[in-house]
Amino acid sequence: MYNVKVLPFSPIRENTYVLYNALKEAIIIDPGCYGREEEEELRQFIENEGLIPKLLLNTHCHLDHVFGMKFVAGNWNLIPHIHRLEKAVLDYAPVAGLMWNLPFDLYTGELNYLEDGDITGLETDPLNVFFTPGHSPGSISFYDPSGGFLVSGDVLFRGSVGRTDLPGGNLQTLSKSIVEKIYTLPEETIVYSGHGEPTTVGRERTTNPYVKG
Ligand SMILES: [Zn+2]
Ligand SMILES: [Zn+2]
């Protein structure tokens, strides 16, 4: 069973998630801490809880989700796990950072690749990897069937969906991902999004104005 901690970071207010089990082993998802102060905030949380970060996962590699990738990978000696189609998105992130006036140091080390159907997560609590493109070409979501939650990145939000006007985005693809991969989950499944408050599969399937179930 995971405890789920959300830390909204950067001016973009991206949700960085820390999932941790009873053994205090932790997964960091979408490290968006921007600058020293936010890096410290993440480090403090990990240390205060006595956590041991074991895994670094990314739903996708838009700039707001990778601001802290270099810090987290370096500080806890972790290799980021992304979908192969996000490599180009990651490489472009510093360019996007300049456009947004949010320059940052890109992580340039080794990467591990995940794809649809893979099992990741901690040994005690496996996570299913779903390929859910449309917001970004290599977006993936992480599903914990026993905990009953999904980390969706920017695919699905409470009352909204991810934008599809960025490079590699496509609304039809996004709708298909949501309808086939997310709306088919049990309705009480909690959805932890890349921005904003959590929601549930049931709530979005019946009330989401952008993608109908
Ligand atoms: Zn995004
Ligand atoms: Zn985002």
Image: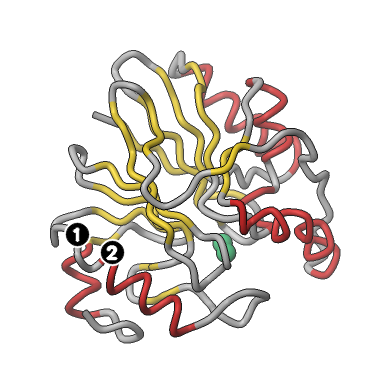
Residue at image mark 2: 182
Q: Relative to residue 206, is residue 156 depicted above or below?
A: above
Question: Which disc, if any, is residue 185?
Answer: 1
Point out residue 88 in the picture as x, y percentages from the top left corner.
73, 59
Crowding at label 1, few (<14), some or many (≥20) Cα neighbours within 10 Å? some
Point out residue 10 in the picture as x, y percentages from the top left corner.
65, 52
All told, the count of numbered labels is: 2
**Looking at the image, which residue is at 38% across and 79% down?**
175
Q: What secondary structure is found at the residue carrying circle 1?
A: loop
Q: Within 8 Å: ligand 1 and the Cβ of disc 1?
A: no
User: Mark 2 and 1 residues: CB-CB less than 8 Å, in contact?
Assistant: yes
Q: Relative to residue 203, is residue 194 depicted above or below?
A: above
Which quadrant: the N terminus? top left
Q: Within 8 Å: ligand 1 and the Cβ of disc 2?
A: no
Depth check, front residue: 209 or 134: 134
Corner quadrant of residue 160? bottom left
Crowding at label 2, few (<14), some or many (≥20) Cα neighbours within 10 Å? many
**Looking at the image, which residue is at 28% across and 64% down?**
182
